[in-house]
Image (tube, rainbow, N blue to C red):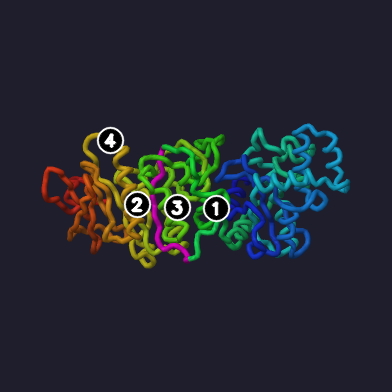
């Protein structure tokens, strides 16, 4: 039951600081998370609580962040553990007396700890009786389930209260209670409350020009190195789960199944600050992607072997997991992607992936026809088979050039291009229409020693250029005729 509760709560947006008053309801149940417990994307719930006085939910959150131990039992327990871990026995004796003298230095440490290591989310619950009963049930289930297990480094292990150490929660009351026999009813009610709670955006400001109408989808890379100069600050991180009230639980479950591949000792950073493979090494590409996001010219989504899909500014850790279409289809990633596109209201989608990879397989499985009334364009750029060696580097670099050209041309599809390095061939697929190759695109750019393929597609066409440096004139043919024995993707 504790796992199911976590999977529901993971759908909600998380706050790393006290948000504006308009972002919080008058009454609700809050859930606190602690950095280092669980993972960056699957954090463990470490405290559950409510506002006891009607209409005072925001004030209750403020008391925890900026108040004192007299008004916040949460702060009292945190200070208790901090002082015991450091062996400050005399200060601890003073601190544990909740009505004792003020201790501003310790209070400042507790406030700093909450700001640096804690985040929270909530569900809105207006009825006072329901709020209290649901809080008790949640605490009892989480304390009994202890899922995920508290880490060996958890601060709560130093708390003087056995209830905290035993339950893995910064709670005292209800940790030894029996959840009772109505678990399915309460779980169903929690699911309703999660769905009903408004999804107020979190994270940094992205610009003032309205929401992006363009979605760029790119693959992750096996190589991950923290960027020397970060493109996104911690306060700017967002979560794709915030836009997935219906299918988010499938993505969360898939991530949980991959959690063993995450290197917990690596720093949490924005995805675009981590991935460093050949695609991401195209000069200036990362900076152009970040700028396009900040100007609301485009949203950038990364298909990830470890996380399924993440926003480019979503917090991740290093991991060791390849994209597996069978695994992620089992967790409905194509349907998750469909909901994300539908809820965000994108008008155009451009994706880049090597033709035979699992990334392309996932993209082809998206029910694009269900989005045909919303989308004006949905284009998948792939790279055809590469004879000989070097494909592992050449193909991602070519895809990176496709994405960079899209951004530079302000998503002018007449200039959609992929860099041709020796024998590489770019193929464009219109994902909104079934493949019916009838007419051929035309046009080519010569950039120094490199060739760029450009053209247009109409009536569901797919086209490609064959570039042979020995020929004075490029040759172009319908995609379906170029790969005998294979069905057009």
Judge the density around disc 3: few (<14), some (14-19), many (≥20) Cα neighbours within 10 Å: many
Dot 3: element: helix
**Is residue 198 visible to us here?**
yes
Say which of 62 and 242 sits in front.
62
Q: At 32% from the left edge and 53% from the top edge, which residue is drawn?
A: 405
From the image, tell me which residue sits under label 3: 290
Q: Which of pointers 3 and 4 indicates the residue nearer the eye? A: 3
**Residue 346 placement: quadrant:** bottom left
| 328 or 477, nearer to the observer | 477
Q: Position of residue 79 (x, y in %)?
A: 77, 42
> Disc 4 versus disc 1: distance between alpha carbons?
37 Å
Name which residue lies at 51% across and 58% down. 243
Q: Earlier in the sequence, mark 1 or mark 3?
A: 1
Dot 3 or dot 4, earlier in sequence: 3
Q: Residue 245: x and y, percent?
A: 53, 58
Which mark is drawn over residue 390?
4
Among the two numbered marks 3 and 2 on one chain, the one whose residue lies closer to the N terminus: 3
User: Which residue, given by chain and number where applicable, does mark 2 sit on?
Assistant: 404
Q: Which residue is mark 1?
A: 236
């Amino acid at each position: 039951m504790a796992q199911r509760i976590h999977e529901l709560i993971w759908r909600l947006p998380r706050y790393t600081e006290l948000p504006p008053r308009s972002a919080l309801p008058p009454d609700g149940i809050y859930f606190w998370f602690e950095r280092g417990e669980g993972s960056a994307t699957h954090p463990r719930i470490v405290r559950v609580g409510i506002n006891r006085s009607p209409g005072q939910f925001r004030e209750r959150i403020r008391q925890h962040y900026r108040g004192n131990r007299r008004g916040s039992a949460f702060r009292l327990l945190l200070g208790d553990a901090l002082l015991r871990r450091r062996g400050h026995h005399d200060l601890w004796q003073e601190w544990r007396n909740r009505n004792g003298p003020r201790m501003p230095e310790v209070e400042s440490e507790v406030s700093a700890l909450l700001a640096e290591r804690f985040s929270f989310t909530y569900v809105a619950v207006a009825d006072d009786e329901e709020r209290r009963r649901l809080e008790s049930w949640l605490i009892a289930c989480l304390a009994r389930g202890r899922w995920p297990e508290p880490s060996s480094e958890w601060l709560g292990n130093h708390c003087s209260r056995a209830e905290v150490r035993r339950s893995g929660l910064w709670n005292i009351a209800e940790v030894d209670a029996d959840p009772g026999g109505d678990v399915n009813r309460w779980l169903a009610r929690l699911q309703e409350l999660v769905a009903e709670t408004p999804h107020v955006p979190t994270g940094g400001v992205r610009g003032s020009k309205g929401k992006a109408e363009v979605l760029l989808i790119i693959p992750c890379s096996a190589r991950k190195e923290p960027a020397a100069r970060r493109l996104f600050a911690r306060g700017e991180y967002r979560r794709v789960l915030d836009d997935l009230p219906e299918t988010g639980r499938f993505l969360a479950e898939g991530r949980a199944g991959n959690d063993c591949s995450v290197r917990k000792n690596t720093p949490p950073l924005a995805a675009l600050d981590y991935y460093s493979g050949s695609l991401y090494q195209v000069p200036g590409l990362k900076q152009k992607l970040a700028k396009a996001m900040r100007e609301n010219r485009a949203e950038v989504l990364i298909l990830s072997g470890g996380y399924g899909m993440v926003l480019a500014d979503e917090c991740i850790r290093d991991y060791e997991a390849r994209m597996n279409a069978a695994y992620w289809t089992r967790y409905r990633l194509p349907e998750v992607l469909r909901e994300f596109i539908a809820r965000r209201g994108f008008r155009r989608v451009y994706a880049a992936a090597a033709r035979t990879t699992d990334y392309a397989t996932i993209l082809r499985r998206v029910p694009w026809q269900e989005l045909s009334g919303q989308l004006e364009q949905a284009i998948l750029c792939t790279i055809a088979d590469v004879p000989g060696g070097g494909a592992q580097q050449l193909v991602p670099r070519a895809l990176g050039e496709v994405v960079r050209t899209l951004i530079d041309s302000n998503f002018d599809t007449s200039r959609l291009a992929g860099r041709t390095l020796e024998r590489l061939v770019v193929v464009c697929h219109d994902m909104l229409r079934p493949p019916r190759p009838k007419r051929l695109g035309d046009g080519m750019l010569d950039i120094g020693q490199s060739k760029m393929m450009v053209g247009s597609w109409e009536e569901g066409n797919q086209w490609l250029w064959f570039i042979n440096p020995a020929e004075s004139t490029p040759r172009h043919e319908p995609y379906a005729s170029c790969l005998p024995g294979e069905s057009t993707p």
